[in-house]
Amino acid sequence: MIRVDLKGTVKEFESGISAAEVAKSIGAGLYKAACAAKVNGQVCDLRTSLQEDCTLEILTFSDKEGKEAFWHTAAHVM
């Protein structure tokens, strides 16, 4: 089990869980709105596997870094 700090609330998950799965466990609305994640201060993909204790922030389009991740991904699609 790993401990994931979600803005002051610590939850335990199985090692290897993805940031997307953590978002889904919090709520369907957050899961649908998620654009990227920030693990220990580093912006990363929602598919990122969490292997050890960490801090996690789910980024949405409302966040500056979430917008940047969305635009970056959209640029690849186009």
Image: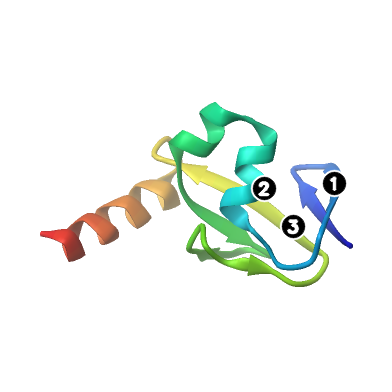
Circles 1 and 2: CB distance less than 8 Å?
Answer: yes
- Looking at marks 1 and 2 on the same chain, the residue that comes earlier in the sequence is marked by 1
Q: Would you say 73 lies left or right of 2 here?
A: left
**Residue behind mark 3:** 55
- Distance from disc 1 to disc 3, alpha carbons, whole Å, reads 10 Å
Residue 39 in the image: above or below residue 22? below
**Quarter placement of the C terminus:** bottom left
Query: Horizontal and vertical percent for residue 33?
Result: 45, 35
**Residue behind mark 1:** 11
**Residue behind mark 2:** 22
Between circles 1 and 3, the one closer to the viewer is 1
Circles 1 and 3: CB distance less than 8 Å?
Answer: no
- Distance from disc 2 to disc 3, alpha carbons, whole Å, reads 12 Å
Q: Would you say 25 lies left or right of 37 here?
A: right
Q: Would you say 74 lies left or right of 39 here?
A: left
Relative to the observer, which residue lies in front, 61 or 14? Answer: 14
Q: Give the residue type that dot 1 points to.
A: Lys
- Distance from disc 1 to disc 2, alpha carbons, whole Å, reads 10 Å
SS class, disc 3:
strand
Scheme by which the image is coloured: rainbow
Query: Horizontal and vertical percent for residue 7?
Result: 75, 43
- Looking at marks 2 and 3 on the same chain, the residue that comes earlier in the sequence is marked by 2
Please give the name of the residue rendered at 62% of the width and 49% of the height, measured from the top-left corner: 21
- Looking at marks 1 and 3 on the same chain, the residue that comes earlier in the sequence is marked by 1
Relative to the observer, which residue lies in front, 22 or 7? Answer: 22
Between circles 2 and 3, the one closer to the viewer is 2
**Quarter placement of the N terminus:** bottom right
